Image: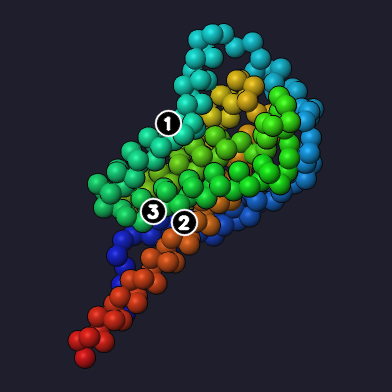
Amino acid sequence: MTGRSAPAVLPPSLRARLGAIAALAALVVFVLGVLYADDSRAGMVDARIWAAVDGAGSSWRQVALATDFLGEPVGAATLVVATVMGCLLLRRPRAAVLIVAGAGLTVGTTTLLKSLVGRTIHGADNLSYPSGHTAFLTALALVVALLASDRLGLGRTPGMSLVLAAALLAGAAMGWAQVALGAHYPTDVLGGWCTALAVVPATAWLVDRTADRIVDRTADAGRRELR
């Protein structure tokens, strides 16, 4: 018999669809990385979006700065600690692990990709693709949405709708802030968003698989001791 110490962080009803989305997102990240490798200019799409966002008033700039802070080390650490504590209070240890692992691997992936792609903005030292800020907040929103979907007992379609809506909202908010502040090209933001969509489902699957194996081995060891 197989034991389970905690509910899965990747609901079985969402695995296939999230897996397909993760694969598509990874493809987008790759294609954009190839297109903008070693580039230092805004593309046609970037220029058009920048023109639409440019000219925001001082009050909107303050909103952008506040949003940007959520992706800075202090802001990000605060969000991670708060969400981990929430998961532990809800007795969802796997979700707490996924918060740390998912956010960490997502940000680590964007850091690695920046070095590999070599796209820059505002000088040769400012690597820009993909946006780590956008990837981080999207990853955090994905994990929280997965937890909420399970807690609410949502089915496949409502659950997917909640997860994708949370990812879109978080990615759009941080992406807008990065573009409005001139910190990233819009395509950097898209790359960061897709990076989170690719990394988090894979990390969730790995967390579940690892936790289940640990539980099974512990249960087997306990049964052997009782013989």
- Camera-near label (1 vs 3) is 1
Can you say whether 3 is above or below 20 in the image? below
Read off the residue under disc 3.
97
Judged from this view, the residue extending furthest toward the left is 226
Determine the residue positioned at 78% across, 45% down.
34
Callout 3, which amino acid? Val
Q: Between 3 and 74, which is closer to the camera in this rendering?
A: 74
Classify 10 Å Cα crowding around label 1: few (below 14), some (14-19), many (20 and above).
some
Residue 47, position as x, y percentages in the image: 75, 23
Classify 10 Å Cα crowding around label 3: few (below 14), some (14-19), many (20 and above).
some
Secondary structure of residue under mark 2: helix
Determine the residue positioned at 26% across, 87% down.
224
Q: Quadrant of the N terminus?
A: bottom left
Determine the residue positioned at 30% across, 43% down.
86
Residue 141, position as x, y percentages in the image: 45, 40
Callout 2, which amino acid? Ala
Classify 10 Å Cα crowding around label 2: few (below 14), some (14-19), many (20 and above).
many
Read off the residue under disc 2.
204
